[in-house]
Amino acid sequence: MLYSGRVQGVGFRFTAEESARRLGVVGWVKNLRDGRVELVAEADERALTQFLEDVRTGPMRNFIKDTEVSWSTATNDFTEFDIRY
């Protein structure tokens, strides 16, 4: 996922991390140099759908201007959800 808007605050990444851990989603989130936030997540489809909804409607919703979502096959490379720097 790529999020744009005023999303580069610590709150956005922390909120994504908290939701991911609660739902058993693994992957990572990080700020990009162009002002967007990139998020890579893996879980079953139900958990991912709930995760996307939580991020979209959660406390950071007013800071998100646009969201780009692309789906692909899981890599199974992740064991937890991290904030990357």
Image (cartoon, rainbow, N blue to C red):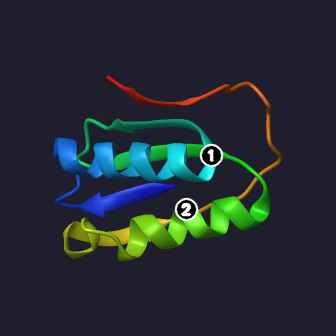
- Asked if residue 44 lies left or right of residue 70, the reply is right
Neighbours of disc 1 within 10 Å: few (<14), some (14-19), many (20+): many
Q: Which residue is mark 1?
A: 25
Does dot 1 land on a helix, a strand or a loop? loop
Residue 19 is situated, as x and y percent measured from the top left of the image, at 46, 53
Residue 3, above or below 38: below
What residue occupies the far front of the structure in this picture?
22
Does dot 2 land on a helix, a strand or a loop? helix
Residue 69 is situated, as x and y percent measured from the top left of the image, at 57, 63
Identify which amino acid the numbered label 1 is placed on. Answer: Val
Please say if the residues under marks 1 and 2 sit with CB atoms less than 8 Å apart: yes
Q: Residue at coordinates 62% horizontally, 46% vertically from top-left? A: 25
Residue 82, above or below 42: above
- Which badge, 1 or 2, is on the more N-terminal residue? 1
Residue 22 is situated, as x and y percent measured from the top left of the image, at 53, 50
Of the 4 image quadrants, the one containing the C terminus is top left
**Residue 51, image quadrant:** bottom right
**Residue 27, image quadrant:** top right
Q: Which residue is mark 2?
A: 51
Q: CA distance from mark 1 to mark 2?
A: 8 Å
Q: Residue at coordinates 20% horizontally, 49% vertically from top-left? A: 11
Identify which amino acid the numbered label 2 is placed on. Answer: Phe
Q: Residue at coordinates 45% horizontally, 68% vertically from top-left? A: 54
Residue 44 is situated, as x and y percent measured from the top left of the image, at 78, 55
